[in-house]
């Protein structure tokens, strides 16, 4: 089963990190990604550009409206995602709990639907 791990971030929190703390967190991420690549569970993932570059598109009564910024008024924002293919939900949850951002803000784990849509 494929799972998407959505990683949330809060720039204000990152600014409170001590010297070298961000490097430590990124090293942890690198270790988890290397493990997933080695096990064949890694499917892909990317960091997202700064939230200041996002656009929100809403269509109401057939008229599109585009605004700057994220769609939610929140301190946290979606910062990136990972896709991995695990044999069990327990394994996917283990990986989500190990992801460093889970300690600082949150991560969200969701199964990826296959073409049949049976997961709905």
Image: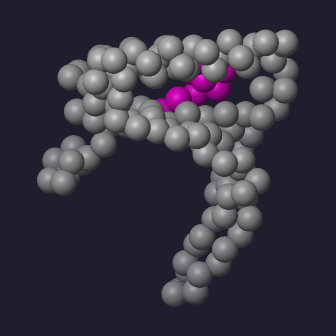
Judged left or right of residue 55, residue 86 is left
Residue 104: x percent and y percent? 66, 20
114 over 110 or under it: above or below: below
Q: Residue at x 28, y 35 (%)?
A: 2
Determine the residue positioned at 58% across, 40% down. Answer: 47
**Viewer-proximal residue, 54 or 45?**
45
The answer to which image quadrant residue 10 occupies is top right
Q: Which residues are magenta?
A: 100-108
Q: Is residue 119 above or below residue 34?
A: below
Query: Residue at point 84% right, 13% down?
Result: 18
Q: Position of residue 4 (x, y in %)?
A: 39, 37
Magenta stretch encompasses residue 26? no
Q: Horizontal and vertical percent for residue 75?
A: 74, 40
Q: Is residue 103 visible?
A: no
Direction bottom: furthest residue = 62
Instruction: Give the residue displayed 65% in from the left and 42% down from the top.
Output: 77
Q: Nearer the viewer, residue 26 or 54?
A: 26
């Amino acid at each position: 089963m494929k799972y998407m791990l959505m990683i949330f971030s809060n720039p204000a929190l990152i600014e409170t990190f001590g010297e070298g703390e961000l490097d430590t967190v990124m090293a942890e991420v690198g270790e988890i990604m290397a493990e997933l690549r080695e096990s064949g569970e890694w499917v892909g993932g990317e960091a997202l550009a700064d939230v200041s570059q996002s656009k929100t598109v809403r269509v109401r009564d057939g008229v599109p409206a585009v605004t700057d910024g994220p769609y939610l008024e929140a301190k946290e924002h979606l910062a990136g995602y990972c896709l991995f293919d695990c044999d069990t939900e327990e394994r996917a949850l283990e990986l989500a709990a190990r992801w460093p951002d889970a300690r600082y803000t949150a991560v969200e784990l969701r199964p990826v639907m296959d073409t049949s849509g049976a997961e709905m």
